[in-house]
Image (spheres, rainbow, N blue to C red):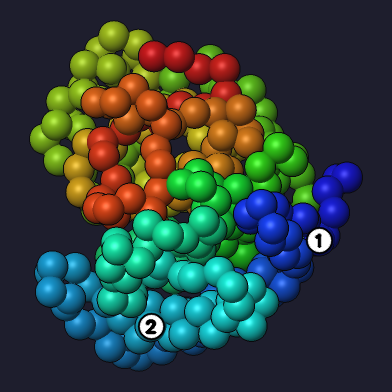
């Protein structure tokens, strides 16, 4: 598809480390294998974190694999992960480049055994993602993007540039399977009434992938969500011609902020306006 398997990412004025795409993808696939070992076991060892959200052995095993491998592949780049203690902002604000990781996005879908979960990894430079990867362990689908290089889907060694197709003539609005609230439901009801849109319920950051593919048109998010839930999907969607806009600022998201909470947003597929 014309994209190098080794992508040069300029991370600073004097640093120019080589990000090895194949090594990153192999890392995510190894983590996915750990996830699936737990997924198909008799006990996923579900526990509750301090905020009441679930965490399983799959989350922590995936986190260990990816963090350990990234420390060897890109030793100068810190990692912000959902499953680690948050690095104080007094230290983080000095990061020119940082990996943002969700080792298992969609833990509730994992526990429900519906397959709608994924691994999300983004490389952020100067607060914007310059590379992003989303891997769905159950199906083996991989989506990835590099700044200025395009967005791609890969499965069974077949690589296809995104979007796969033009947006549907009838709009399709995406809603989270496990994390939606009254504000989102009200917005969607008005949107459906105005446009005749269909509604697709889907778990995790896979919603960004449907937008990037052109199989859905809009995804509103007006509830609790964090940077690691969005960063990889952001660049995959943007490089596929789509957009994500925060509802209050009217701007695209930035990352490695003092608060890692992501403000409310609306994401759109290529060529689609509300």
Tell me where residue 254 sits by quadrant: top left
Q: Quadrant of the C terminus?
A: top left
**Secondary-structure class at tag 1:** strand
Residue 139 in percent (x, y) is at 58, 63
Report how many numbered discs are placed on residues in the image.
Answer: 2
For the point 35% across and 67% down, the residue is 91
Q: Position of residue 217 (x, y in %)?
A: 47, 26
Residue 19 lies left or right of residue 80; in this view the side is: right
Q: What is the CA distance from the residue labelled 1 to the residue labelled 2?
A: 28 Å
Q: Is residue 80 above or below residue 75?
A: above
Residue 109 seen: no
Instruction: Read off the residue under disc 1.
Output: 6
Asked where in the image residue 6 lies, by quadrant, the reply is bottom right
Front position in the image: 97 or 137:
97
Mark number, residue 73: none
> What residue is at 39 percent from the left and 69 percent from the top?
81
Q: Which residue is mark 2?
A: 60
* Lateral position of residue 48 relative to residue 37, left or right: left
Residue at image coords 11%, 35%? 182
The answer to whether residue 235 shows anywhere in this view is yes
Badge 2 element: helix
**Whole-percent x and y of residue 87?**
32, 70
Camera-side mark, 1 or 2: 1
Between discs 1 and 2, the one toward the N terminus: 1
Disc 2 packing (10 Å; few <14; some 14–19; many ≥20): some
**Quadrant of the image for the N terminus?**
top right
Q: Residue furthest top?
A: 194
Is the C-beta separation of discs 1 and 2 under 8 Å? no
């Amino acid at each position: 598809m014309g994209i190098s398997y080794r992508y040069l990412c300029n991370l600073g004025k004097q640093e120019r480390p080589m990000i090895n795409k194949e090594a990153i993808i192999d890392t995510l696939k190894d983590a996915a294998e750990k996830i699936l070992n737990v997924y198909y076991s008799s006990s996923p060892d579900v526990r509750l974190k301090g905020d009441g959200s679930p965490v399983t052995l799959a989350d922590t095993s995936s986190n260990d694999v990816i963090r350990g491998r990234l420390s060897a592949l890109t030793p100068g780049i810190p990692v912000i992960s959902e499953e680690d203690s948050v690095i104080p902002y007094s230290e983080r604000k000095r990061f020119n480049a940082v990996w943002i990781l969700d080792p298992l996005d969609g833990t509730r879908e994992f526990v429900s055994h519906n397959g709608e979960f994924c691994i999300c990894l983004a490389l952020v430079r100067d607060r914007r993602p310059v590379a992003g990867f989303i891997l769905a362990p159950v199906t083996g689908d991989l989506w990835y993007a590099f700044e200025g290089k395009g967005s791609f889907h890969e499965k069974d060694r077949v690589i296809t540039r995104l979007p796969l197709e033009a947006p549907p003539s009838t709009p399709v609005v995406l809603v989270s399977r496990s994390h939606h609230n009254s504000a989102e439901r009200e917005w969607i009801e008005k949107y459906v009434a105005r446009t005749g849109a269909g509604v697709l319920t889907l778990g995790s950051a896979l919603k960004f992938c449907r937008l990037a593919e052109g199989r859905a048109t809009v995804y509103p998010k007006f509830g609790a969500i964090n940077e690691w839930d969005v960063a990889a999907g952001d660049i995959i969607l943007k490089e596929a011609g789509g957009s994500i806009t925060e509802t209050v600022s009217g701007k695209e998201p930035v990352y490695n902020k003092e608060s890692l909470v992501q403000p409310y947003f609306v994401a759109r597929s290529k060529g689609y306006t509300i």
